Structures are given as structure tokens and as C-alpha cells.
Image (cartoon, helix red, strand yellow):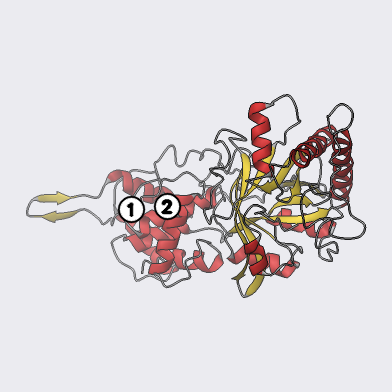
Amino acid sequence: MSRPTSPRVRLALAGALSGALAVTGVAVQAPLASAADQGGTGSTSERRAPTVEEGQVVTPGDFTGYGFDQCLAPTQKAMNTWWRTSPFSAVGIYISGTSRACRDQPNLTPSWVVKQATRGWRLLPITLGPQASCQPRFPRYDDDVTIDPRPGRKGTYVRALKMGRREAVSAVAAAKALKIAEGSTLWYDLEGFDHNNTACRESALSFLSGWTQKLHALDYVSGVYSSVSSGIKALDDARVNRPDRFALPDAIWLARWDGVANTSSSYIREDGWRPGGRVKQYRGGHDETWGGVRINIDSNFLDLGKGSTARPQGEMCGGTRVNWPSYEMLRPPRETKNGTVRPDPEKVAALQCLLKQRGYFDTEITGTYGGRVVNATKAWQRDHGFAEKDLWARTHWMSLLAAGSKTTTKYGSSGDAVRRLQRSLNAASPKAKVVVTGVYGAAVEKAVKDWQKRVGMSASGVVNAATWRKLQAGRRS
């Protein structure tokens, strides 16, 4: 993970010792959304964020999306800016361990933790304590130690096991001091080592077994970060070949700098820690700038718990369908030489329903494009900066479908704000064809980036207030 080492040195270490980590549960109640935002459901807005109750955080929650880790916990201002502008929704923070590079964490306080969780950040608390006995870069200081490699009389590496238990106790104490509550995942950073050194490998596995045992006893969830070719491979081999020998972690964090934002690697089997038990650090230390704030980070992709999910959408206007793969132009019936041309009644019903939700249409849903619909559409057009016309074009659809709060929405977000975004993207382009699920995934990210490019915005995939304004203005190019 990220540490104060030059990029050149970090890249040189990316071989046999690849993966250096920079250094989970908060209960935050999501804010209530208006009935109009919810499409009349009146349910709470979903962020699927870590939860925060009475100032205690349980993290990371159910999530699929991007994260970053950095040796030094960023300032509050930097975190606020990156929430609005970056694609990341998770952050790794070093909370304990005598071998960590950034022992001093001036920004990392209980208040900082609660503020990030309340905003929606998924926190990944990291401990970097004793390292494998054959790891050449450790011990780092005069007062830290490495894992005891002696097998003992019974060959069970009990000394290493006990060290892992002690480190878990220390990590839990640090977590509780920061308001990171029981039920959270705590991650142990075991840097890459020589996987073929038997005593080194077996003592490391025993240490991690002790870490997991004690975390479970203390009601926390166990996570382990390591190079996929050493620590993670050793855990996966133990899972398959010696399933009863070690207490295995609940989740693994693969260090594999292949540039691919997923949670897979050819070094380990695909069935382990699935579903919902993997994080992958897919890019090592590099600078990224979002909103004018530059931070040196490692990039990660998370797939934890149930992943990002959304509750089913509540019924709207007595069951009127409002989710469509495309939203074509509507206009009043008109006479042609081939007879009367009428708009699709189902799309007209959707328009009536959506206008009704926003207070512009106050009669029953009929699916007929009559005078009252024309009056309502012209009122919407007038109030939202459009020329008044007796037709309803894609740009008008976009404005109506995107209407509501301008909450920051990005990969991994879920809920009704995502549904508004998905519908508006389908109105913006007949090629989008985004399935309205309420979950911001890869297909939504592509559609957002394509639209951002067309309207001259930076293709970040992040839908913040500035992006919502363009959607609500009906910008298509």
C-alpha cells in the first residue's frame, strides 16, 4: 500500500514482493428523500453506506466499486473534494501497527471517522504490525519486530499464533478509540515475502490465523491484505489443501498491479472468498488529482458483502410504468393523409405520472395527450428555461427525469437518485439503453462518461451537482 517510497522504488518492488498497502463497520442513517424524489414511495434514500449510530461506525457495508488507500489519512477538505469529484467511495486508513510508515496520523480522529462515514465513505481500517520473518524491508524501526518463525516443539508455530492474537487486540483497541465499532472489517497488511520459505510462510499463516481468531472473539470481521503471489496465494492454498489447519480471514485484499479494476487474479482460484469477500489493489502508488486536490494513492476495486444493491422501486401512480429503454418525442394527436397519429399511450401515462409527482398534473392518469397534458408540459418548459411548445422532446424528458436532489452519485451508489440518472441517460441518447436498476455499475459508468464527453465535461463518471445541472437542463450535446 501507499507509503513514502519513490515511484521508481515501488515499481521495482512489484515483482516477487509486489503489493505494498498504504497503511470495516459505521452505521450512518441515510437522509430522508422527498416523496417526489422517491417516485412517491416515501422510503429513505439508499446509499448502502457504512452505518453510523450514536457516533459509532460499522464499515464497510455492502459495496461494489472503487476505493483508494494512502499512507496518511487526508485532510477533511481533501476528502470533501474527492467525494464530490473522484470516482472513489472507499478509503483505506492506517489505524495501528508499529511497522506502519505513517505512525503519526494528525487527521485521523474519531470525528474524522464519523464525518467520512456519514458522508458515505466506506472505511478500510488497516494494521501494519509484525511482518514475515523473510521480508527484507522489515523490521522498519528499532522498536518493531517480525513474526517469530520458530515452529516450536509441536511444529505449530504457536509463538506466531499468539503474536497475531495480540495484534488483533491492539487493532481493536485502536478501532474502538476511533469509533469504529464491532461488526467492522479490520485489515492486516502483510507485505510480500518469499512464499517458498517454509518457516516464513507457515509462521505468517499462523500469525494471520491468530489475528482472525481474536478478531472473531472480539466481534470484528477479519480481512487480510497481501501480495497475491505470496500471502494471498498461501491463504488460498491453505483454504483448499488444509481447510482445518488455520482460521482463515473473512475477506482478502489482493495486491496485484495489473491495471484491471476487478477482484480476480491468475495466482489464486476463482471460487475463494466469493461472493462478496474480495478487494483488489490493481494499481500501485501514483498521483491523482480530483477537484484540484492531488494525493498519492493506490487504486482498488471492492466487491464486499452483498455488493451494491437497491431496494425494489415502489409502485408509482397505481402501477404506471416509468422505466423505459428510450424516451421518444411526444406530441398531441395530429391528422395526416393516412389518418390520425397518436402518441404511445404508455409513454404519455409515464409523462402524466412524472409530472404529477412534481406537482404539474393533478388529474387521473389516462395515457391521452390532451389539453391538460399540453398545459402541464408548457408549464414545466416555462419554469425550467425551455421555449413553450406543444411537443415533449428528449431534452424535456431529461429535465423531468433528472429532477430532484443533486446528491453525488458514482460507481457503487444505489437508490432512487441512480434511477433518476438511469432514466435521464436513456432520454439523452437512444443508444444508451441503460437498464433501470437503481444500482450504479459498469454500464451506467460507460453511459455517463459517453454523455459527459458529448456535453464537453470531463469524463469522470461522477455525477455531482454540476453534472446534475446539465442533466436537468436537458443537455444532449
- Residue drawn 51% across the image and 50% down it: 440
Q: Which residue is mark 1?
A: 327
User: Could you classify mark 2 by the number of other residues whose Cα lies within 10 Å: few (under 14), some (14-19), or many (20 or more)?
Assistant: many
Q: Position of residue 66 (x, y in %)?
A: 59, 54
User: Could you classify mark 1 by the number of other residues whose Cα lies within 10 Å: few (under 14), some (14-19), or many (20 or more)?
Assistant: many
- Residue drawn 79% across the image and 35% down it: 209
- Left or right: 370 as drawn, with respect to 253: left
- Left or right: 401 as drawn, with respect to 65: left
For the residues labelled 2 and 1, the Cα–Cα distance comes to 9 Å
- The residue nearer to you, when weighing 413 against 252, is 252
Q: Amino acid at mark 1?
A: Tyr
Q: Residue furthest bottom?
A: 292
The answer to whether residue 400 is seen in the rendering is yes
Q: Position of residue 108 (x, y in %)?
A: 82, 61
- Left or right: 79 as drawn, with respect to 146: left
Q: Position of residue 454 (x, y in %)?
A: 38, 68
Where 146 sits versus 268, above or below? below
Mark 1 falls on what kind of element? loop
Q: Position of residue 377 (x, y in %)?
A: 36, 60
Q: Which residue is mark 2?
A: 423
Q: Which image quarter: residue 329?
A: bottom left
Q: Amino acid at mark 2?
A: Arg
- Residue drawn 75% across the image and 68% down it: 75
Where 129 sits versus 79, above or below? above
